Amino acid sequence: MAKRYAAVFALLALIFTSLVLRPPVAAIGPLIPEFISVEKLSLLEVGLLSSISVVCFGLGAFTGPWLVKRFGLNRAMLFVLLALTAAMALRLVGGVLPILSTTVIIGLAIAIGNVLIPTVVREQFPKKIELITGVYVTLLAISASLAATIAVPSSDALGSWREALAIWIIPAVIAIVFWIPIAKAKSSTLTVSEKTHADEKRAVYRSPLTWAIVAFFGLQSTGFYATLNWLPSLLIDRGFTELDAGGLLGLTTFVGVPTGFAISIFIRRFQSLSAISVAVTSFTLIGLVIIWGYNDLVVFGCLLLGFGFAATFPLSLILVGSRASTSTQTTQLSALAQGIGYLIAATGTFLFGELRRLTGNWELSLIMILALTTIQLAAGFYAGRNRVIPAK
């Protein structure tokens, strides 16, 4: 019975943790006009706000393994949730400096959570890894979509952006409550010799497959976060209302609810993932083209874009998990893919907005993202071939 209760607590902790790892970032894009008008943020400061969290996603990914080594997996996850919740609360103070500084902490906390959760799933649910991963990816999509969709209506109904963002402190607190008893339990650790660790790390760095996966992860993240942060502003410039723009962003992310789960469950049946990588990336490309040139078809374009993003994210995680030869390699590859990948995404997200500021329109920004998505297509084709990184 004790084991059954422990599993229930672990599942509930994972559910509420998943619900809070995207909204603190996803809700920002639709609220950008309010940040500009109320908090007097400049376009440069908005660009920093939009990209700084993704920079932290990259930097924090390298911090995760050290934190686990120092405190243990479950305690590290509890510390991440405590830091995330505190930063979300402090951000409500307002002002340029508090907003940007707390966004750094939020980004680092989410980054470490991103790295730790796959290990948590493996440790807590060793016989249901694929199913629980599907649940995790689905909840990420639901929470991101919901946060983007209700951001503006919540701000209007409750009074300001502060109340709209404060909503997401609630699931964070619930996640902490469920995580406390788990943090008190001992977690298993996998140890390897220093020489073996060094050999496997070297093999990961030397493999071209590694860098194809890094490119695929980074470029699909670039498209997603550029869209998450700038699509509402782009649509408003095209004549849409703030409410409609936020709703279309919510639609784009909502497509990921069934798609991410289905991909996670069924994709492992295919030995070669090259064709799937090319197909889902093509949906992203077509969606971008439609949004660029066809206002009347923008809903269809958002659906295609959302499907592409929803499929490529779990696909990138599956590539990380299936292209390494050992568990140690998987950890190294995950940290590398998420660390460098999110830094690529942060740079691309910032440039997307900065090109708009410098040119006065979105044309060059869209050309840039189309070019990067084309490179993503090639990287996915290479990474999807049925091969693994050598053990040493």
Image (tube, rainbow, N blue to C red):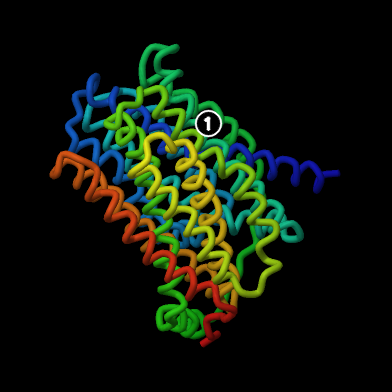
Tell me the element at label 1.
helix
For image coordinates 50% across by 52% down, the residue present is: 308
For image coordinates 68% across by 51% down, the residue present is: 132
For image coordinates 80% across by 48% down, the residue present is: 3
The image shows residue 383, relative to residue 120, as above or below, that is below
Across and down, in percent, residue 352 comes to 26, 48
Q: Amino acid at mark 1?
A: Leu
The image shows residue 270, relative to residue 261, as above or below, that is below
175 on left or right of 295: right
Q: Nearer the viewer, residue 262 or 38?
A: 262
Across and down, in percent, residue 347 comes to 27, 54
Quick one: quadrant of the N terminus? top right
For image coordinates 35% across by 49% down, the residue present is: 54
Across and down, in percent, residue 37 comes to 23, 21
The image shows residue 38, relative to residue 102, as above or below, that is above
Q: Residue furthest right?
A: 1
Q: Residue furthest left?
A: 358
Q: Which residue is mark 1?
A: 146
Task: Give the mark count.
Answer: 1
Q: Nearer the viewer, residue 340 or 300?
A: 300
Q: Is residue 130 visible?
A: yes
Instruction: Kindly indicate the quadrant of the structure image that contains residue 105.
Output: top left
